[in-house]
Amino acid sequence: MGWLFYFWSMTGKPIGVFDSGYGGLTILKELVSKLPQYDYLYLGDNARAPYGTRSFYAVYHYTLQCVKWFFKQGCPLVILACNTASAKALRTIQQNDLPAIDPEKRVLGVIRPTAEIIGNYTKTNIIGILGTNGTVQSDSYPIEIKKFFPGVKVFQQACPLWVPLVESNEYDTEGADYFIKKDIDNLISQSKDIDTVLLACTHYPLLLKKIRHFAPERINIIAQGEIIAESLKDYLIRHPEIEQNCSKGGMVDLYTTDSTEDFDRHSSVFFGKGLKSKHINVE
Ligand code: DGL
């Protein structure tokens, strides 16, 4: 396996998938299921998660370090499968850094592709957004959704403890229930006509069972995985010059900046126990 990995690492041009931690695995799973022909390289910056409560500069600086790491591994395209990084770092990286690093490379986020479609799910034209502090405070979702669905009203609720609960394996506890219920109640109390709630953080689908339990039954809960996978499929059709650069060996490689044991426990939920992560430092 060693020489095979060496050969692949010298020739492979995987699609990079980045998240602050485990959450992006919910996106990676859908990418692998809808676009299995490509190679994927996943990096979770678990050592510095959560990003959601960090400053603009910290999120930008950490994300840029990780994006540069992906480029060093040969990735022609990196998906920021992290709403917080998409909200706080994507634009600066696209506009200021990419032209200097390599104008042929691409970095894409998850907010715009979600905003392009989320309005189709609501009948009342009232949507609720659950996200990290960073995503909610950036107002990225209300701004982007307005561009595609001007008639849709958006209410937001930050859930600052949800990611720490997932990252610390505490999400299946009564303590977690308290915070999950409280944030859902706060969102729903903003408008009784919310009929669609977007999980605008890649970690939240891991709490889906509990979210469904505490949300009123009439509410449609939307996770982003399938939306992002469909959007990437469409992007690669529209950009054959990028698509041709992506290697197609069906390989998935996982990296974390923190403990591989913890990472493997989380990733086995999505990819079984056979896939072992590796540790790296990006600093
Ligand atoms: N999972 C990330 C997101 O989609 C960020 C979580 C965090 O690190 O706070 O927003």
Image: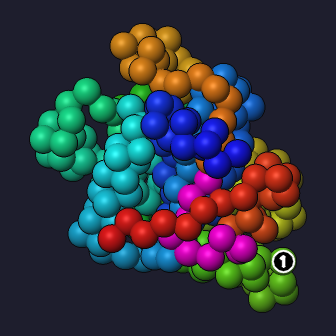
Vertical side of 82 occupied by 168: above or below = below
Query: According to the image, label 1 marks what residue?
Result: 172
Q: Give residue 178's position: percent from left, percent from top.
A: 76, 84
Looking at the image, what colour scheme do you see? rainbow
Q: Is residue 160 left or right of residue 185?
A: left
Q: Quadrant of residue 139?
A: bottom left
Residue drawn at (25%, 27%) of the image: 104
* Quarter of the image with the N terminus in it: top right
Residue 185 to residue 31: above or below: below
Q: Nearer the viewer, residue 188 or 91?
A: 91
> Is there any visible trace of residue 199 in the rendered image?
no
Q: Nearer the viewer, residue 51 or 40?
A: 40
Looking at the rendering, which quadrant does residue 216 occupy? Answer: bottom right
Q: Along the horizontal axis of the image, is 190 left or right of 79? A: right
Percent x, y of residue 7: 54, 36
Element under disc 1: loop
Vertical order, 264 against 29 (above or below): below
**Mark 1 is on which residue type?**
Asp
**Residue 268 in the image: x percent, y percent?**
81, 58
Q: Which residues are magenta?
A: 254-262
What residue is drawn where x is 35% and y is 46%?
Answer: 72
Q: Nearer the viewer, residue 97 or 59?
A: 97
Residue at screen point 50% across, 41% down: 9
Viewer-closest of 94 and 46: 46
Residue 248 in view, yes or no: yes
- Specify whether residue 256 is painted magenta: yes
How many residues crowd mark 1 within 10 Å: few (<14), some (14–19), many (20+)? few
Where residue 131 sits, quadrant-wise, is: bottom right
Where is the C terminus found, in terms of image quarters? bottom left
The residue lying at 21 percent from left, 35 percent from top is: 102
Q: Position of residue 114 (x, y in %)?
A: 52, 37
Magenta includes 232? Answer: no
